């Protein structure tokens, strides 16, 4: 465990409401579980999960103003819906308040709400963990996503993005273009993996077929030799 984690937990417990703090712990532990599953650094996953919602303590107008005051880029969509800014402001706080300077951790916190094209392993771990953590109960397809996350992280990430986009469209909510771009990119990643898997399976089937043909040839030659010996033996017996 990173030596900063206990103190950060204590600080966040004071700053976040009870629900948000419990959610934070759920995401933190789920990040570590996914990191173990996919061979990622546990300390980095721990910090990313612990700090991902650190800016949720602020009301939307306050978040917007803090971002503007600190020179954090704000898109038109984020200005209309400042709740999205908790990710960017959270990354700023992770670096400037909690002393986290690892670019992978900061990237994961920054994009954990909308995703982004070209997501790293930690980006995907945090994005998925935020959706499937044990205390969540209302997100769509939770049992399936919780299982899938530990089987195929890319597929889980893509399906979660699709589910979120479908929900936003059905409810008439604003959709951040970054989420659409991230979903499109994950669709490409999943499609390429499926093609590679299908290609590998095809090669395996071809190898098996070639081995089978070769086996038949060898057995055929052996049978032919055996038949020849038996024929000569019978002819010899007949002549005697």
Image: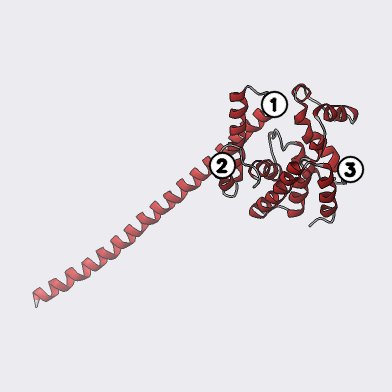
Q: Which residue is mark 3?
A: 97
Q: Which residue is mark 2?
A: 193
The Cα atoms of the two marked residues, 1 and 2, are separated by 26 Å
Determine the image quadrant of residue 113.
top right
Q: Characterize the local packing of mark 1: few (<14), some (14-19) or many (20 or more) Cα atoms within 10 angstroms.
A: some
Residue occupying the point 73% across, 36% down: 111
**Residue 131: x, y in percent?**
65, 41
Q: Is residue 80 toward the left or the right of residue 100 in the image?
A: left
* Mark before the other along the chain sequence, 1 or 2: 1
Q: Closer to the observer: label 1 or label 2?
A: 1
In the image as oriented, which residue stretches furthest toward the bottom?
A: 240
Q: Nearer the viewer, residue 138 or 36?
A: 138
Q: Which residue is mark 1?
A: 176
Q: Are marks 1 and 3 in contact (CB under 8 Å)?
A: no
* Mark before the other along the chain sequence, 2 or 3: 3
Residue occupying the point 68% across, 23% down: 174
Q: How is the image coloured?
A: secondary structure
Q: Nearer the viewer, residue 62 or 181?
A: 62
Screen quadrant of the C terminus = bottom left
């Amino acid at each position: 465990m990173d030596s900063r984690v206990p103190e950060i937990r204590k600080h966040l417990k004071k700053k976040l409401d009870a629900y948000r703090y419990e959610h934070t712990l759920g995401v933190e532990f789920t990040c570590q579980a996914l990191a173990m599953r996919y061979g990622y650094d546990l300390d980095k996953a721990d910090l990313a999960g612990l700090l991902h919602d650190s800016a949720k303590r602020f009301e939307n107008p306050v978040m917007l103003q803090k971002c503007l005051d600190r020179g954090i880029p704000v898109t038109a969509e984020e200005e209309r819906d400042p709740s999205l800014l908790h990710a960017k402001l959270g990354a700023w706080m992770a670096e400037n308040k909690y002393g986290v300077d690892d670019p992978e951790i900061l990237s994961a916190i920054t994009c954990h709400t909308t995703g982004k094209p070209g997501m790293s392993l930690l980006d995907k771990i945090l994005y998925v963990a935020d959706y499937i953590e044990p205390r969540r109960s209302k997100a769509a397809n939770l049992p399936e996503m919780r299982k899938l996350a530990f089987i195929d992280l890319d597929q889980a990430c893509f399906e979660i993005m699709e589910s979120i986009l479908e929900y936003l469209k059905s409810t008439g909510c604003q959709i951040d273009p970054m989420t659409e771009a991230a979903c499109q990119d994950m669709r490409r990643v999943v499609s390429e993996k499926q093609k590679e898997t299908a290609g590998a399976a095809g090669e395996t089937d071809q190898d098996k077929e070639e081995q089978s043909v070769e086996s038949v040839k060898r057995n055929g030659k052996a049978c032919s030799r055996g038949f020849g010996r038996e024929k000569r033996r019978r002819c010899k017996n007949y002549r005697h």
